[in-house]
């Protein structure tokens, strides 16, 4: 006999309700807007976007290569930028709770050091 994960069920219900209230179409538009800013601005400072620029073939994960990828990753993490490093690729994955100002801040941190 097992006990139902009541706390997990309530958490799942609340998080699903939050997503539905925000609206999946709104979330998608917001994510692509944040991604467009990342792609445009980071490409201007020497980062190479790895992925489709076509919205229909894009996800909310934005991957970039750069010259000093490990040092860049370390520098960004030290500056409280949450991202991952996978196979020498920097991966940013903003979500609907992230703002354009946060994306601008990430870009500012990167351009300040000229990674």
Image (tube, helix red, strand yellow):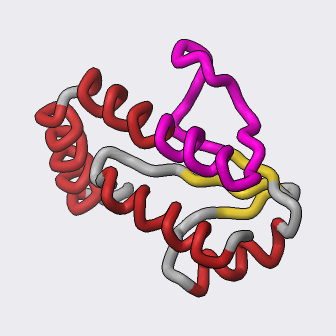
Identify the image quadrant of the C terminus. Answer: bottom right
Compared to 97, does 110 lie above or below? below
Return the x and y of residue 62 as percentages of the image width and height. Answer: 61, 43
Which residue is located at x 47 percent, y 42 percent?
37
Question: Which quarter of the picture shows residue 51?
Answer: top right
Q: How many numbered tags mark residues here? A: 0
Return the x and y of residue 17 as percentages of the image width and height. Answer: 15, 39
Identify the image quadrant of the N terminus. Answer: bottom left
Compared to 114, does 11 lie above or below? above
Judge from the rendering whether residue 17 lies leftward or rightward of residue 56; answer left or right: left
Q: Nearer the viewer, residue 27 or 73?
A: 73
Question: Which quarter of the picture shows residue 43?
Answer: top right
Which residue is located at x 80 percent, y 52 percent?
65
Q: Nearer the viewer, residue 19 or 6?
A: 19
Q: Is residue 81 visible?
A: yes
Q: Nearer the viewer, residue 96 or 37?
A: 37
Q: Nearer the viewer, residue 108 or 54?
A: 108
Q: Residue furthest top?
A: 56
Question: Which quarter of the picture shows residue 53?
Answer: top right
Magenta residues span 36-62
Q: Residue furthest bottom?
A: 78
Residue 9, magenta (yes or no): no
Residue 58, magenta (yes or no): yes
């Amino acid at each position: 006999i097992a006990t139902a994960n009541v706390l997990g069920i309530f958490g799942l219900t609340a998080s699903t309700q939050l997503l539905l209230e925000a609206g999946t179409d709104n979330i998608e538009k917001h994510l692509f807007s944040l991604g467009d800013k990342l792609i445009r601005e980071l490409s201007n400072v020497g980062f190479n976007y790895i992925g489709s620029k076509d919205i229909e073939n894009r996800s909310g994960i934005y991957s970039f290569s750069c010259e000093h990828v490990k040092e860049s990753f370390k520098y960004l993490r030290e500056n409280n930028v949450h991202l991952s490093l996978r196979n020498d690729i920097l991966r940013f994955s903003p979500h609907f709770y992230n703002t354009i100002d946060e994306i601008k801040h990430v870009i500012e941190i990167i351009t300040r050091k000229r990674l």
